[in-house]
Amino acid sequence: MTLDRRAFLTVAALAAVRPLRLDAAGWRAGVATVDITPRTSLWMAGFAARTAPSSGTRQPLHAKALAVEDAGGQRLVVVTLDLLGVTGGMSDRIGAAVARQHRLPRERLLLASSHTHSGPVVDTQLMVAYDVTPQQVRDVEAYTTALEAQIVDVVGAALRALAPATLHAGHTTATFAANRRVQYSPDGPVDHRVPMLRVDIEGAPKAILFSYACHNTTLQASNVEWHGDYAGVAQAAIEAAHPGLTALFMTGCGADANPKPRGTFEHVEQHGQALATAVRGAMASLTPIAGPTRAALDLVDLPFEAALTPDQWKQRYGLTEPYVGRHAKLMDEIRARDGALPTSQKMPLQVWRFGRDLTLVALGGEVVVDYALRLRRDHPDDNVWPVGYANDVFGYVPSKRVLDEGGYEGGGSLLYYGRPGPFDGTVEDRIFASLSRLMRTTR
């Protein structure tokens, strides 16, 4: 399958025909959008219970790029994706191509996903969960190759659109997220904050970047139409209400939160419209922010506790066939190829500072809410904006509390991601030690 990138790439016309004039804060910004909806049927990502590939489109999927440049000429680009997430391999390939073609350092590119469960499988992500044929795997590989090229192109389009801008930050709230680990924590924590960044270009609002810490799983495994879930509805509703504005969504640290209620298209509309209303209501009251920008990216090693046997996966986490058998086959293939199973997982951590006004902290993996709450406690003066599902969605990242409680988020989910076993008890401390270093180096 080949996608014609030129046919689907649409760039917001942001550059003025008159000479550019930097505003007092020195910002420039540009935004671009590309349609990434698969043009053929593919297996859909996120639900092991699905029994069929996609069948049509209910809502198109997009990749959107927002580029900002400070007064010193330092640039940042965030790409938001209506996908379950990108893999580490995709992130490496995209980052290398963007550095080569657009001269943007890797630490200044952020790949953030909505984590919709009604998008396509990409690369080799979660293959243990799916009953795919060899041809379906080849179709996914072809789509992934085309998608990576589209992402590189949309980054370039946003950079070419740079024009004088102002940036405004703040937050609002939404209340439909509910902690889903009720069997362990009946009153478990939830993050209802909706951080926001509004970008005005040439004096008019042209982009709104926002996030919410909740799974995009309103639609269930029975849905086989492409759809952005509540995040897709929210973005479309904001753009419809504000012509010329591009809405970009990132998922927060919501790995242990689901929308409530969920299961129908009516619920998707309900939550998406609620989030859009919250964002629109707060857009006018955001506070201007100043530069300069600083950026840092690091990889932290998260050790696995041990490689579990098939019986141990079943006994500890209640997992069943055919998934345990597929996982065992994958482990045998990795041993044959590499000589041993991996003993740790690399997790990307990224920090962007916008002067003293805003600090965006992007974490790889499916990060539970405890990380967002602790980040704000540990760094109360940094106006921290926590984001999950960034740069590499390799599996769930439990806190010490969730790891001790166990269950799906506490370790069982890593079987579906093709990891040899659950993480050990040091992962939260390792992550925060690395984050503390990044916070210091960017301060």
Image (cartoon, helix red, strand yellow):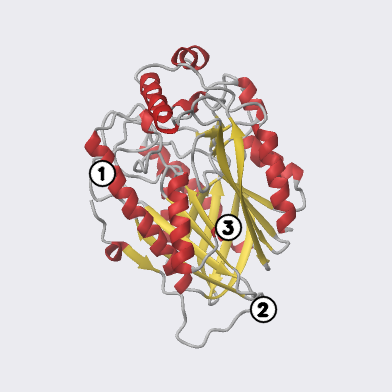
Name the N-terminal-most of marks 1 and 3: 3
Name the N-terminal-most of marks 2 and 3: 2
Residue found 47% across the figure and 15% down from its top: 318
Q: Which mark is residue 374?
A: none
Mark 1 vs mark 3, CA separation in Å: 31 Å
Residue labelled with disc 3: 107
Q: Quadrant of residue 399?
A: top right
Label 2 crowding class (10 Å Cα cut-off): few <14, some 14-19, many 20+? Answer: few
> Which percent across, then down, holds residue 332?
39, 24
Label 1 crowding class (10 Å Cα cut-off): few <14, some 14-19, many 20+? Answer: some
Three-letter code, disc 1? Asp
Label 3 crowding class (10 Å Cα cut-off): few <14, some 14-19, many 20+? Answer: some
Query: Is residue 19 found left or right of 266 in the rendered image?
Result: right
Q: Are marks 1 and 3 in contact (CB under 8 Å)?
A: no
Question: Looking at the image, can residue 98 be seen?
Answer: yes
Three-letter code, disc 2? Ala
Q: Quadrant of the C terminus?
A: bottom right
